[in-house]
Amino acid sequence: MRCRTGINISSIFITHWHADHFLGLPGLIHTMSFQNRTDNLEVYGPRWAGVPSLFALINPRFEVDFIEVAAGDTIKKDSFCVRVFAVDHVPNACGYVFQECERPGKFDRSKAQALGLQPGPLYKTLQKGKPVKVKNRLIVPSDVIGPPRAGRKIVYTGDTRPYEGVVEAARHADMLIHEATLADDLTEYADTVGHATASEAADIALRAQVEVLVLTHISSRYANANLLLDQAQQVFKDTIIAEDYLSIEVPYKD
Ligand SMILES: [Zn+2]
Ligand SMILES: [Zn+2]
């Protein structure tokens, strides 16, 4: 509500059932119910026996569908799809790749003009993928429209140790949101508790060749995240630290 995005969202993706990752859910669902929501809400997440009793406890006025996911699954939505990948934290913990669908290729106006095409209905026909005729000459879409352009890719890890599977999943992503619970002096301890350090997260970003790395899940032992930011940026320069209400524009590459 404070972000002004509205809370009438349709789907929520849970990476694992540790309290810091799902205890906000009962309050959020209760607020939605209080605001007279009627649409179903989909909650995606890995297997957990406690899910039914969690939703029974909230008992909202609308339906909450829990959809169990596992690494390798793909969830298709209208303009994007979500791929589930394994992380290394607790059994079944997962991350999500949000992959926007391909966009149509660029329309080359100068080429169109050279072919005698005037802006208007014929442009639209070509953009819909159909050929048109100009002065008895057949013009097909590929004459004036470039190849389809990739959609944006945003990858969210949840909690994880540094993990090769994340490098795979995050390859060439426009944004990688990776946990960095601890600073580098606690590398061994981070491994013990199933988390990553700042420079470990940065190393994943570097090897996956992502555009931007956003660090999150910083331990509350750090009064501010400057130390972690420094350590990460020595490995991967385009790093920022997530904070409440942070809003980031993800531009298209082309
Ligand atoms: Zn956790
Ligand atoms: Zn956590």
Image (spheres, rainbow, N blue to C red):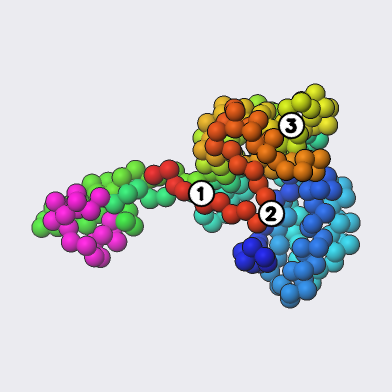
How far from the left and from the top, in percent, is residue 247? 59, 54
Figure disc tally: 3
- CB of mark 2 near ligand 2 (< 8 Å): no
Q: Residue at x 51, y 49 (%)?
A: 250
Q: Say whether marks 1 and 2 touch (CB < 8 Å).
A: no
Q: Is residue 112 magenta?
A: yes
Mark 1 packing: few (<14 Cα in 10 Å), some, or many (20+)? few
The kind of secondary structure element at disc 3 is loop
Whether residue 166 is visible to the viewer of this picture, yes or no, is no
Is disc 1 in contact with disc 3, using a CB cutoff of under 8 Å? no
> Range of the magenta residues?
108-126
Tell me: 108 left or right of 198: left
Tell me: 53 left or right of 203. Answer: right
Q: Position of residue 6 (x, y in %)?
A: 64, 67
Please report the residue visible at 65 percent of the width from the left and 56 percent of the height from the top: 245
- Residue type at tag 1: Val
Whichever of labels 3 and 2 marks the residue nearer the N terminus, that label is 3
Residue 244 — which label?
Answer: 2
Counting residues from the N terminus, which is met first, the one under dot 1 or under dot 2? 2
Q: Quadrant of residue 231?
A: top right
Closer to the camera, 130 or 52? 52
Q: Which residue is labeled 1 in the image?
A: 250
Does residue 243 appear anywhere in the picture? yes
Residue 38 appears at what percent x and percent y? 71, 72
Label 1 or label 3, whichever lies nearer to me, is: 3
> Which residue type does callout 2 highlight?
Asp
Residue position marked by numbered label 3 in the rendering: 183
Q: Residue at x 79, y 57 (%)?
A: 24
Q: Is residue 63 left or right of residue 82?
A: right
